[in-house]
C-alpha cells in the first residue's frame, strides 16, 4: 500500500479487511482515482481497449503491480481488490 500511495498519492487505498474482513489484500476505488500518465483513468471496468487496459486496469498500474507480485480483481464495476500472487 505504501508503494501505491507514493506513486499515486490521490488513490483511495484501504485494506480488504476494512471492506469485507478478508485478510491480505488492498481495496481501492475504480471510479474516482487518479489518471495514468497518458491522461486516461487508472481503472475502467467497461474499457475494451486492449492497448491501454488489461481486464479494465490501465497497463501502467497492471504492469507495476505485476512486478511487485500482485494482481487485481474486480469486486464490482467501482471496486477493485488487489491481492498478492
Image (spheres, rainbow, N blue to C red):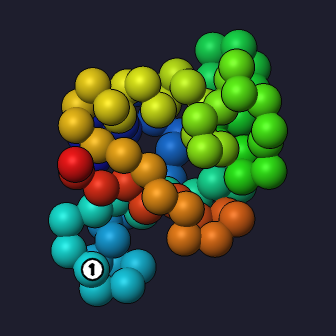
Asked which quadrant contains residue 21, the reply is: bottom left
SS assignment at label 1: loop
In the picture, measured across the screen, residue 52 lies left or right of residue 5, that is: right
Asked which quadrant contains residue 83, the reply is: bottom left
In the picture, measured across the screen, residue 55 lies left or right of residue 72, that is: right
Q: Is residue 33 visible?
A: no
Q: Is residue 40 visible?
A: yes
- Residue in the image at 47% along x and 32% along y: 62
Q: Position of residue 58 (x, y in %)?
A: 61, 31
Residue 79 versus residue 9 in the image, above or below: below
Along the line of sight, the residue nearer the viewer: 48 or 64: 48
In the picture, measured across the screen, residue 8 lies left or right of residue 83, that is: right
- Residue in the image at 27% along x and 80% along y: 22
Q: Which residue is mark 1?
A: 22
Residue 85 versus residue 52 in the image, above or below: below
In the picture, measured across the screen, residue 21 lies left or right of residue 41, that is: left
Amino acid at each position: 500500500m505504501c508503494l501505491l500511495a507514493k506513486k499515486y498519492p490521490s488513490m483511495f487505498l484501504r485494506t480488504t479487511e476494512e471492506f469485507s474482513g478478508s485478510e491480505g489484500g488492498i481495496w481501492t476505488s475504480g471510479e474516482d482515482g487518479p489518471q495514468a500518465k497518458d491522461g486516461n483513468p487508472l481503472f475502467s471496468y467497461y474499457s475494451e481497449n486492449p492497448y491501454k487496459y488489461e481486464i479494465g486496469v490501465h497497463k501502467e498500474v497492471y504492469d507495476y503491480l505485476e512486478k511487485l507480485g500482485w494482481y487485481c480483481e474486480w469486486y464490482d464495476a467501482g471496486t477493485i481488490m488487489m491481492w498478492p500472487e
